[in-house]
Amino acid sequence: MASVKARVKAPKTAKKGEVFKVKTLISHKMETGIRKNKKTGKLIPRKIINKFSCNYNGKEVFAGDWYPSLSANPYMAFYVKAEASGSIDFIWTEDGGKKYKKSTKITVS
Amino acid sequence: MAARNIKNQQKLRLVKQGQTMWNARIGVTILAGLSISLATVISGCTTSDQGWKGALEHYQADDRRSGYTYREPEQQAIQNDDFQNPGMILVDDGEQLWSKIDGAAGKSCASCHSDASKTMKAIGAHYPIFDEKLGKMKNLEQQINICRKDRMNAKPYKYESSSLLAMTTFVRHQSRGLPVKVIVDGAAEPFFQKGKELYNKRVGQLDMACSNCHVENAGNKARADTLSQGQSNGFPTYRSKWQKVGSIHRRFRGCMKNIRATPYKYGSDEYVNLEFYLAWKGRDLLVETPAYRN
């Protein structure tokens, strides 16, 4: 069961200028690239999430490059300042360029 | 004798400290509870099982204490928050499997049992139960495989495979917050005695029984680790040591290796009986599946 599922927990409403916490979690196996296939003896190619970014109304507000030794199913929590109503998009980029996206809406009063 | 008294006093002090900490935590829980009930009003979904989480009185029944109470506040916080609890990933996997059609009969679990949140409620809390056809006890894992074989005509899941773990965790998760209750009399009685015997029997090179640690020394240290009462109400449990969710039988095997005994096989009668006795030992403790332990 290697289904990748992204989860995000962020408030639906916030006051302008408020700093709120965003929690993210993606279920991902994070293949290290140093494991060998037991039958063939060949290396299993690395497949980890190498970049995570959070865009608030199209503007990048939080991002990180991820490297080997990060855990499987990485959990990331950070703070964002509420500026305007709109969408918050979360993008996880896997080795090979595949992207997993999730977005939430926020109403700022 | 004097030394023992001092030790008891220290213990008492520790318990008291723990309780003040808990009082502070209860305050936080109430706040969290409020925000949850607000969220419930907004989204219209029920989160009734959220209310009990974090409050100490819900993690013990008489002198029986869940392993939760022996853990550090940081670890408890991970279990309290479904989002952070890594075991919840498996619950999601199980939910997918629940309605996935498998086997020659063209059925999924949902074909017979429909909505798991209704039909599986409290089921996991009553296992292991006596099976008349088998003439012995069966646990949840075995029941799932019986269903797969007899009703779905599908291949049984391998014990401790991620599919079986996901399904067991999902089913038992539906009983979260409900008390563990097993029927120990009648036909199940001899199996209960067998489980009890194994629990109290010294085995292995270290010549130790389950009870030597989990009854006589619960709360004391075994090297750097705090021994708990070894209750099973949180299983299948996510252990940070394993980096994944594991069944109670995996835990049994680990314990038996630690005392240098030869572990029984996954799903063996011995372990099912032991699981049965252990469920009775932790009766009325609330199911926490998936718990988070170290």
Image (tube, rainbow, N blue to C red):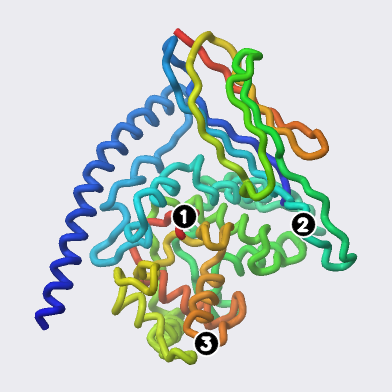
Q: Quadrant of residue B206?
A: bottom left
Q: Between tags 2 and 1, which lies in front?
A: 2
Q: Are circles 1 and 3 on residues that touch, CB within 8 Å?
A: no
Inspect the image, locate mark 3, and give the three-letter code of the amino acid beneath it: Ala
Label 1's element? strand
Residue underneath mark 2: A34
Q: Position of residue B211 (x, y in %)?
A: 36, 81
Are the residues under badges 2 and 1 in a single subunit?
no
Q: Quadrant of the C terminus of chain A?
A: top left
Q: Where residue B24 is drawn, which disc sits there?
A: none
Please tell me whether residue B252 is drawn above or below residue B52 in the rendered image.
below
Mark 3, residue position: B261
Q: Name the chain letter of the residue that bears numbered label 2.
A: A
The residue at which mark 1 appears reads as B292
Q: Is residue B293 above or below residue B101?
A: below
Crowd around label 2: few <14 · some 14–19 · many ≥20 (10 Å): few
Residue B135 in view (yes/no):
no
Q: Are marks 1 and 3 on the same chain?
A: yes
Q: CA distance from mark 1 to mark 3?
A: 26 Å
Q: Position of residue A86 (x, y in %)?
A: 58, 12
**Residue located 21% across and 52% down the image:** B19
Marks 2 and 3, how far apart in space? 34 Å
Front label number (2 vs 3): 2
Cα–Cα span, label 2 and label 1: 29 Å
